[in-house]
Amino acid sequence: MATVHHAQHTITVAAPADTVYGLIAEAALWPRVFPPTVHVEQKPQGGGWETIRIWATANDEVKSWTSRRRLDPAGRTIAFRQEVSQPPVASMGGLWTITPLSADSCEVVLDHDFTAVGDTPQNVAWIEQAVDRNSGAELDRLRVNAEQAARMPELSLTFEDRVTVQGSAADVHDFIWDAAAWQERLPHVRRVVLTEPGPDIQTLEMDTLAKDGSQHTTKSVRVRLGSERIVYKQLLVPALLTAHTGEWILRETPAGLTATSRHTIVVDPDAVAGVLGPQASVADARRFVRSALGANSLATLGHAKRYAEERAGLSKVG
């Protein structure tokens, strides 16, 4: 019988308990809130139950698993149990408990229980380290996000750019997924290091040029969700941001294939003055990031459009 191991992590948050509970309950927000989380697919099942599929980093490795959760907003608890785990985890579950301390503060307790594949000391140690690192990072950013909740509409921004392509979705998809070739195909990409740690998962490190000539290094995890969607999260973000997630979406329309690049960013208000100057505001930072990311996304979409249309036999493209 495998040994069941336990871990507990606690933090005090200067925000209302319901605000904190809401951030934990809305798992689709986790890539923006929790540093280890890359992407979440959330599916309600009724009666307070739901399943979530998570892609996240653990000890610098990319892992994916499916969990079932029971949400209790009245008691401010969320119980979870992995239905499909990844080695070295054999099983894992736990409980979030949010306890009000006052109208504007609360205590968050995150409990885990787990068993390890083979019950070996090496696997137990790996899981203990991953749980400790991820829980610490998650609780810290949960605190920051909850305490900045009133400013989140100001700090966060979701935007998209799109092109219409008279070519196949498969060719556009291949162009976007084959990021190893971007250094040769995209003028704004100076360096690419691509690895594929698992099926439909990539890690992508790039040096890119902005319109102002500055160069930035980013590192992302990308996940392919079928033939029409690629999602990603930057693990190494520019100095202006605390979070950047995105997706590439392909949709067939009567006018042709629509290829969309969507970004969600969260500005770090403490970094604005140091990056953009003492007079700059968060609004200035939003405009700056929107312009820089949009320009590079449109450049990528434009090259993907040309690639697909040339392969479709169109000699001239817009």
Image (cartoon, rainbow, N blue to C red):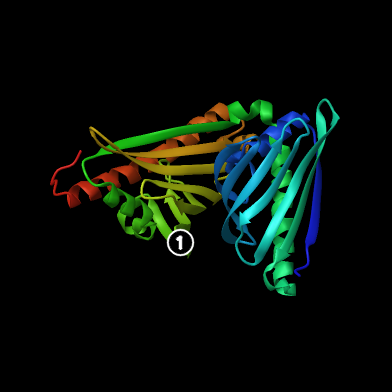
Residue 35 location in percent, x, y?
Answer: 63, 48
Instruction: Give the tally of numbered discs.
Output: 1
Give neighbour class at mark 1: few <14, some 14-19, many 20+ (Cα, 10 Å): few
Quadrant of the image occupied by residue 133 = bottom right
Q: Which residue is mark 1?
A: 199
For the N terminus, the image quarter is bottom right
Q: Nearer the viewer, residue 186 or 171?
A: 171
Using residue 12 as the reference point, say whether residue 308 is left or right of it: left
Label 1: element kind? loop
Residue at the image position 66 percent from the left and 36 percent from the top:
48
Q: Is residue 191 among the parts visible in the rendering?
A: yes
53 vs 117, left or right, is left
Tell me if I can see residue 240 in this picture. no
Query: What residue sits 35% from the left and 51% below the top?
Result: 176
Residue 246 or 19: which is nearer the viewer? Answer: 19
Q: Position of residue 107 (x, y in %)?
A: 82, 38
Residue occupying image coordinates x 56% and y 41% = 42
Q: Closest to the observer: 103 or 71?
A: 71
Residue 145 at x, y percent in the picture = 68, 36
Please indicate whether residue 229 sits to the left or right of residue 33 in the image: left
Residue under the image location 51 percent in, 37 percent down: 264
| Amino acid type, label 1 | Pro
Q: Nearer the viewer, residue 55 or 69?
A: 69
Query: Where does the image place residue 212, in percent across and percent down from the top left?
Result: 43, 41
Left or right, 230 with reference to 57: left
The quadrant in which the C terminus is found is: top left
Residue that extends furthest to the right in the rendered view of this protein: 101
The quarter of the displayed image where residue 26 is located = top right
